[in-house]
Image (tube, helix red, strand yellow):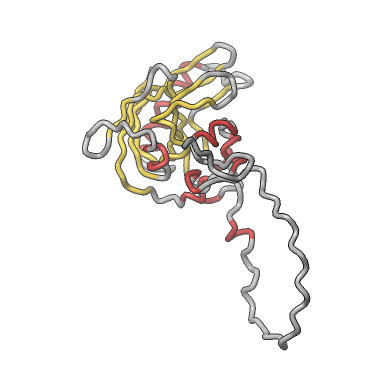
Amino acid sequence: MSEVLVKGVARYPRVMTAAEFKNDGKFKFSVELLVLKGSEDFYKVDKTFNELFKNTYPSGPPKSMKKCWKDLAIEEPENTDLSNYMALKLSSGKAYPPSVIDAARQKVIDPSADGQILGQDIYVQGKLFSYANQSQGIACYLNAVMFTGVDGVIPKESFSKAPSAESIFSGIGEGPVTPSAPAMAPPVAPSAPVTLPKHQMTAKAGGATYEACTANGWTDQTLIAEGMMLPPEGVSLSFS
């Protein structure tokens, strides 16, 4: 294994509570760390990853190789806010929780801390390793995490692969508005029953869309349990 100690912006943090991502009964602690290309941390991870890659696959990568170190300009080309970042995915099994401390070097035990560090700068210590079982690739074991309490430079709404409302409606209503003559108000028709969307994300999702979460392995059950999505009825669960 090749050890790395690196700083980046936390995306999809699950360092306090293990989660099931593939409906396979396997729960994992994990976090995706966004690292700016050209930074010292980028070169640190990139060098270690490439050395392990060359030693493991001297004749070239296997046909269906999985990688924990990905270029977001290639993986998410539609999300231009992340084009200058690499993503390092770290994870560990449910039986091996990472050691987590805050900036004061105090142990963190609050389960809700996952939601608090979304979009913040954090330090992670992990170990890159190659594997060959049902699939082949290079992964990174999640060993330890340190929170800084400092928000990263990436806007949280940029974490989602879906376009923002600002970009969707850009250009609308930007020209001069000509006031129209007052008109008689039309009769009010009876309102149709409101149909709620099937997947309603909450503020705890940090701006991530349902599609973005499920693309990264989240299930409906996990999203609802963590308070990141409302139940199908559109109301929060109550256990009182």
- Looking at the image, residue 210 sits to the left or right of residue 185; the answer is left
Tell me what residue is drawn at x 27 percent, y 37 percent. Answer: 102
Residue extending farthest top: 133
Tell me what residue is drawn at x 53 percent, y 46 percent. Answer: 202
Q: Quadrant of the N terminus?
A: top left
Is any atom of residue 61 visible in this view? Answer: yes
Please determine whether, in this image, residue 97 is positioned above or below residue 149.
Answer: above
For residue 106, which quarter of the picture? top left
User: Number of callouts in the render?
Assistant: 0
Tell me what residue is drawn at x 64 percent, y 81 percent. Answer: 176
Query: Residue 236 versus residue 40: which sits nearer the camera?
Result: 236
The x, y position of residue 108, in whole percent, is: 29, 33
For residue 107, which quarter of the picture? top left
Query: Residue 190 versus residue 176: which sits nearer the camera?
Result: 190
Please determine whether, in this image, residue 163 is positioned above or below residue 174.
Answer: above
Query: Residue 230 versus residue 8: which sits nearer the camera?
Result: 230
The x, y position of residue 177, in whole percent, is: 65, 81
Query: Residue 140 versus residue 30: which sits nearer the camera?
Result: 30
- Looking at the image, residue 92 sits to the left or right of residue 196; the answer is left
The x, y position of residue 133, in whole percent, is: 55, 11
- Looking at the image, residue 133 sits to the left or right of residue 145; the answer is right
Is any atom of residue 161 visible in this view? Answer: no
The x, y position of residue 178, in whole percent, is: 68, 85
